[in-house]
Amino acid sequence: MKEERKRSIFKNKHWEYGGNIRVSVVTAVYNMADVMPRAVESVERQSYRDIEYIIVDDGSTDGIDQVVFPFMERASIPVMYIKKENGGVHTARNAAHCHMRGEFCIGIDADDELVADAVQTCLNIWDAIPEAERYKYKGVVGRTVDIEGNMIGAAFPDHINDLPTEQLNSIISKINADFASMILVRVLKDHPMPEPEGVTFVTENIRWGRLNKVYPSYYTNDMLYIYHTESDNSITRSRKRTVQNVINNRWNDAFFLNHWDLYPYSSMERIRFLAHYSVMEQILRMKHRGQYQKCPLAKRKDRLICHFFYLPAVLAAMRYIHKKMKL
């Protein structure tokens, strides 16, 4: 295998010969060595073969190399493996996006898997869109299923792609499910995730909420992604919150509020963001006694509204600390 950048990047023997790559598949992983084999094998099993696979290890400590390196040796597709210090999934995805050579990107979590024809299905749908209309879309969004093959969440309504953007976004926001997507690489590279110092999780909604306001994806009820929840490492598993979680939440709230005009959210949703921000702020004051990095709201009106939330925010913070946080 070829090594670059002080042994941080590894490529298998097929990487340099990947000349007709159309789709880059990406997995960002942190400490999921026990479940990752099914994810990587699902990429290898794809019926469409003009793909590459980029895996980013975000500072794992559980021996993830013992899964990735043997896979790279036997894989029949180009594979790049990036090892980096832990910085959060948003930084890992940014690292992968820098190296993508395809026209599209499909992301897969390390504890889930793609159905065997996921890439081919997405490309068939994209190629069926009249060429003169493709400029409107940033990619294709499909559905996830559970391990028994049942669709997660309500089906998209018929003719959803004919609806105005505002109505479409309203419908999508009410479907309680994660979706699978194939997104244009140029869109991802033009809109990287922010990487604020001291924040270990930046929600993907910061990117997608802004992009969804500008132009939609093309939606389909085709099944693309098998979503697993049975693993101890599942991202859906409930865990006690830490101070770092609170710092992350407060930064995400502040980012939305400080860039509100970029997002398609309502005035009522703004109030909810402000209320949540106020609770996170009070938790940090209680846990750190004011000794933490400031994350100010840029707009005076938002700061004034937070003053009205002071007493309920204090009470909610006390409850949050008692019920949800590690003591």
Image: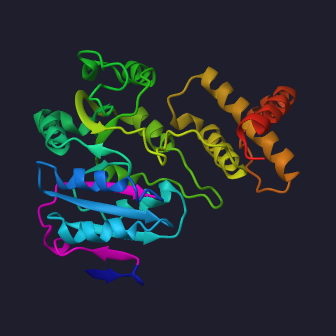
Quarter where residue 86 is shown: bottom right
43 horizontally vs 291: left or right: left
What residue appears at the point 25 percent right and 66 percent down from the top-left corner? 71
Magenta part of the chain:
8-29
Q: Residue at x 13, y 72 (%)?
A: 17
Q: In the image, is 2 to the left or to the right of 308?
A: left
Observer-nearest of 29 and 54: 29
**Residue 152, x across and y down, in percent:** 35, 26
Q: How is the image coloured?
A: rainbow
Please identify the residue farthest to the top as the structure is shown: 158
* Residue 153 screen position, x and y as percent: 37, 23
Which residue occupies 38% across, 52% down? 35
Q: Is residue 25 magenta?
A: yes
Q: Position of residue 194 (x, y in %)?
A: 53, 54
In which quadrant will I find the N terminus?
A: bottom left
Question: Can you see residue 103?
Answer: no
Q: Nearer the viewer, residue 56 or 146?
A: 146
Asked whether, in this view, residue 327 is left or right of residue 183, the answer is right
Dividing the picture into quadrants, the one containing residue 41 is: bottom left
Any part of residue 116 in sight: yes
Residue drawn at (34%, 45%), measured in percent from left and top?
A: 112
When asked about the image quadrant of residue 183, the answer is: top left
Residue 296 position in % (x across, y down): 75, 47
Residue 22 drawn in magenta:
yes
- The foreground one among 44 and 178 is 44
Residue placed most toward the observer, 17 or 13:
13
Is 173 above or below relative to 115? above
